Image (cartoon, helix red, strand yellow):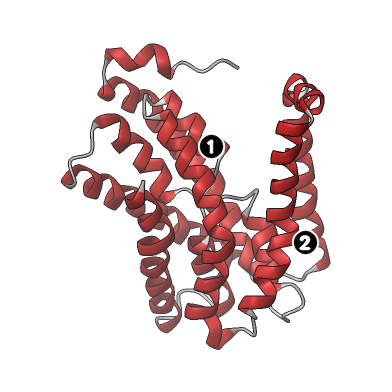
Amino acid sequence: NAFVQLFNLGLLPVAIWAVSRVLIDIKVLSTPLANGVAVCAFLPMTVNMVIVLTKSSGGDEAAAVFNSACGNLLGVFVTPAWVQALLGSTSSVSFAATVIKLSYRVLAPLFVGQLTQYWLPSVAKWAKKHKPSLKKLQEHLLTFIVYVTFVKLDVGVGAVDVIIMIIVQCFLLVASMGVAWVMLGLLHFDKKLRVMGLYGCTHKTVAMGVPLITAIYEGAGQPLGLYLLPLLVWHPSQLVIGSFLAPRLLRWVGPSSESSGELSV
């Protein structure tokens, strides 16, 4: 668990930030797009995707649940800290103001939700019954938030810049997964934890990422659209790669995990 969090919120952000500075120096990416690549790396892991892919790959589902929940809570504090520490010279972001903003936008609703679950069982039962519909509503609202963000902002980059950024993001994702996989093997984690770690070490969340990035850079005079764009490339790419790897990893983990790796739709 500690390794996954340190890799996802420690090693990966620093490594990709360093790569983004090189890309600026050799003029492969503009500064705003390179900063967006770095900001994407500063974010915590996904929740649903890590859990689903871990389960379908025969990995340790309990570890996936714990790490995804823990990572998202840590991200509220770690993400703005990385932005302040590594991108502070290129932005006017206040760490304290950002944490306060994220506390009532992210932590407060989470806290209310947990209280509702335990103190209002009828509401929790209703939410569980309508979980598929609420999930679809969540996805539509997230899409709407992203749409409104880009409608309000001029992204200001050409098609070539976007294509280069997409290639860079895909390369960084594959490279990050490769490094994580090798390190997990060198540390002698068992197969199920290694599978979980592959996803947990490298996944980045859109559901938490969009409100985090918006809260951090809102009103700071920064090109918010360029900071969101790399995340919108990384997120579907990790799903495509994860879906490709899942059946292969399930076979690698072994026959005993095949039944637990089946997903009910």
Spatial CA distance of label 2 from label 1 is: 23 Å
The secondary element bearing badge 2 is classed as helix
**Residue 204 visible in the displayed image:** no
Residue 9: image quadrant is bottom left
Specify which label sits upstream in the sequence, 2 or 1.
Answer: 1
Viewport quadrant of the N terminus: top left
Q: Mark 2 points at which residue?
A: 149
Residue neighbourhood size for the residue with mark 1, other residues' Cα within 10 Å, grouped as few (<14), some (14–19), many (≥20): many
Residue drawn at (65%, 81%) of the image: 94
Viewport quadrant of the C terminus: top right
Q: Position of residue 227 (x, y in %)?
A: 62, 67
Amino acid at pointer 2: Thr
Residue drawn at (35%, 54%) of the image: 176
Q: Mark 1 points at which residue?
A: 49
Residue neighbourhood size for the residue with mark 2, other residues' Cα within 10 Å, grouped as few (<14), some (14–19), many (≥20): some
The secondary element bearing badge 1 is classed as helix
Q: Nearer the viewer, mark 2 or mark 1?
A: 1
